[in-house]
Structures are given as C-alpha cells and as structure tokens.
Image (cartoon, rainbow, N blue to C red):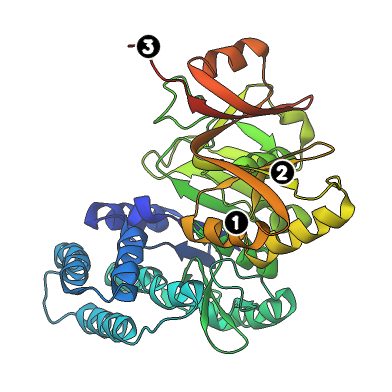
Amino acid sequence: MKVFKFGGASVKDATGVRNMAGILGKTTDRPLLVVVSAMGKTTNALERLLSLALDKASTDEAFDRLQAFHMQTVSELFPDPQHRVYSGLNSLFAGLKQALAGLIDGDYDAHYDTIVPYGELISSCIVYHFLLQHGMVVTLIDAREFIHTDAHYRAANVDWEKTASACSLLESETYRKGIILTQGFIGRSANGHTTSLGREGSDFTAAIFAYCLNASEVVIWKDVPGLLNADPKRFARAVKLDQISYTEAIELAYYGATVIHPKTIKPLQNKNIVLKVQSFLQPESAPTLITAEPDFDPLIPSIIVKDEQVLISISPRDFSFMNEANLHVLFGILDALHISVNVMQTSAISLSLCVDRNDEKLALLLRALQEKFKLRYNTGLSLLTLRHYSQALIDELSQGQEVLLEQRSRITTQLVMRKQPSDQ
C-alpha cells in the first residue's frame, strides 16, 4: 500500500480537484490511501468564524462567504443540482452552524477542535463524490474512527495501540481493490470528542496511517517542486534538495520548515518508509526523497525564518541562581500552558526563551511567573535558523537587523532578531 496526502493548496478550487483526480487516475497502485486537507484557506476562515462566535458577534456573513466558496467549487464540478454531493454538504454546513451556535465560554482549544475540523470533512465529501463520478473505486472513511488520541486539544497525542488496532480493518479484502479516502488533521479522544493533531497536521495523518498499515511509501503533494532549502516566497535563490535523511528532515521540521509537519518523520523512520515530497503542478518531475540514507545529506545551507516571535528573559527575584529547582518550576508552567520553546539560552542568573507569539498564552505565562521571577520580553521579532551555515551567509541574512540572541552549534545557528530603525 501507498499513502498520498494532498494539502489545501492542491484542492483549493475546482481545477485543483480535477488535477488531483488526474494524478490518482494515472496511479495504478491499489489499494491506495489518500489523505486530503481542507480546501485553500478554509482553516483560516473557520478560525475566524470561531473567534466571532466566541466574541458573541454575528457569524452570518463569514459563514455565508465560506459556504458560497465551497458551493461555487461544487457547482463547477457537479453541474447537476440534484447530485448527492449537495445533500451531503448541506448536512455538514448545518452541523457547523449548529456547532457555532452552541459554543459557550470555556476551553478555546476544545472549541477549536469542534469547529475547525469541518474543513476536512467538507473537503473529503467533495473529493469523494468527484472521484466516484469519474469511475474510480473509492471508499470514504472518517479518520476519527481510526485515529485515536488523548484529549490534548489542538495538539492531540496518538494512542498508537488503539489506532493500529482500528487500522487493521483497512487491510481486509473490502478495501484491497480501490482508493481509501480520508481526512487529515483530525482524530477522536476516548471521550468521543473530535481532536486535531496540530496546524498542518495532515502530513502527520498520512504518516500515522502509513505506519499502522506498513505502507511502502508516503507521497506528500505540494505546490513546490519538492523540499526546498528555503521558502521561495522569501528567497529567490531557493533550490530543491534531491534527497535527505530522516534525521535531517526531522531537524528541518523541528526548526520550522513548513513543507513537513514536525511529527511526520519519526513513525516513517521507525519502519523505514520512504517519504516523497512531490509537485502536484508537475507530477512527472522527480520528487525529494527522504530516506534512511545518511550519505545523501547535502551541505546546501537551509534557511528557515519564523516571524511573530517573543523573547522572554527570566531571572529569580530572590538571591538564588537559575538552578534546577527554578528550571523545574518554569518548565512545569510551560508544559501546563502547552508552550513550545524555539530557542533557549541560560546563564547563572537568567534564562532567555524564544517562543511563537500567542497573546493569550503569553499573558497566562507572565501571570504565572511574575511572583517568583523578574520578567522582560520583546515582541515583533523573527527567528532565523541556518543549517550548514557559513559566516558569510549569517552576515548577509542578518544585515540591517539587531541580533538579540544567538546560539550556534557545528551545524546549526539560530538568531533572534529585530529590524534596526532606519536612519532619518
């Protein structure tokens, strides 16, 4: 079995869905498990709807706009207004509207996982009916029936034993001759609630199914030629990495490379499953291969930039040092708030942390720390990570920036920076 994953950009409109169907039609491998994401910017639109609902503002206009976007796509793919896809979508949008109306004050992350997964459910409904219309043997499954998680909303942890047991059903003869279509990003906790695997978590979904089904390979279809050494929207000189190791891919994903979800690689590495990153715009072109082979790691520098960073400096209020006891308290609070640290630097009397900006969590963190620690922080920063760096490249990319924190190893350097004010 092979596993394909198509992201939101690959199914963002009717043309994208047709292109996806064309790729699947030319792929003779069966069974084939296909994971789809929400269409285009649907996740952003659903996040906006959630915010409006929680602020007790009207969601009507934003809801109608989201529904109209999908119905426009459907009308291009299914000219017959009596096609079954319309009743399926009407049911999903009715469920979404009811869910929005039923939100009450409480855990934002739990509300998020109630609302935002509708994007994947809607997308998979459209794709399923289009593939059927084109004569393909396809079965639509609900990923929540197979991917079992804990209740850590927005970043759920997989219960691998239960998930593997559920996925064994997909190895039966019923599924052997066709395409198994499912949703990325979502799972279900033991209490029956929908959970999500984290933003851009559809890659991880593909890896979970691949691991549990002993797939031969996973192909992630993207709107880029493969895995690039930099974001081509930022760096015109970005080049494709033809082949890298699992270890290098894990490092790049950890530091923020957006082509691959950070959790994707490990389950594939554990079973030596090849990962390909391939262009859905040029499906005949060679993909990037991610394998166990360490000899293929190129020394091409990789450049990763994360915006909207916060640098927090923490020091004890008393005469103690930044010792193990203080670190234990600090990291306990970070864990409780589900805040990930991108860079950490410690000295005898202080600790500096660079984290993604989240105003709500930042306020909670500062409140929890202020009694025991002195705090200073800066917002509006960027984090530059260079793999296989050179001093010349560091100088080039930090030009015009004030470096607030730098951390360097033999292979990787990271700089927390802000723009220097221009001279008037």
In the rendering, at what x and y percent does residue 265 appear? 67, 51
129 on left or right of 387? left
Q: Nearer the viewer, residue 329 or 142?
A: 329
The residue where tag 1 is placed is: 366
Mark positioned earlier in the residue sequence (2 or 1): 2
Question: Which corner quadrant of the image does residue 343 belong to?
Answer: top right
What residue is shown at x 53% (from left), y 18% (from top)?
397
* Residue in view at x 63 percent, y 77 percent: 149
The answer to whether 386 is drawn above or below residue 258 in the figure is: above
Q: Which residue is mark 3?
A: 423
Res 271 visible: no
| Helix, strand or loop for disc 3 | loop
- Please give left or right for residue 298 compared with residue 121 in the image: right
Alpha-carbon span between mark 2 and mark 3: 45 Å
Report the disc number at residue 49.
none
Are there few (<14), some (14-19), or many (20+) residues within 10 Å of tag 3? few
Mark toward the viewer: 2 or 3? 3
Give, as a three-letter code, the residue at label 3.
Asp
Which residue is the extreme one toward the front? 318
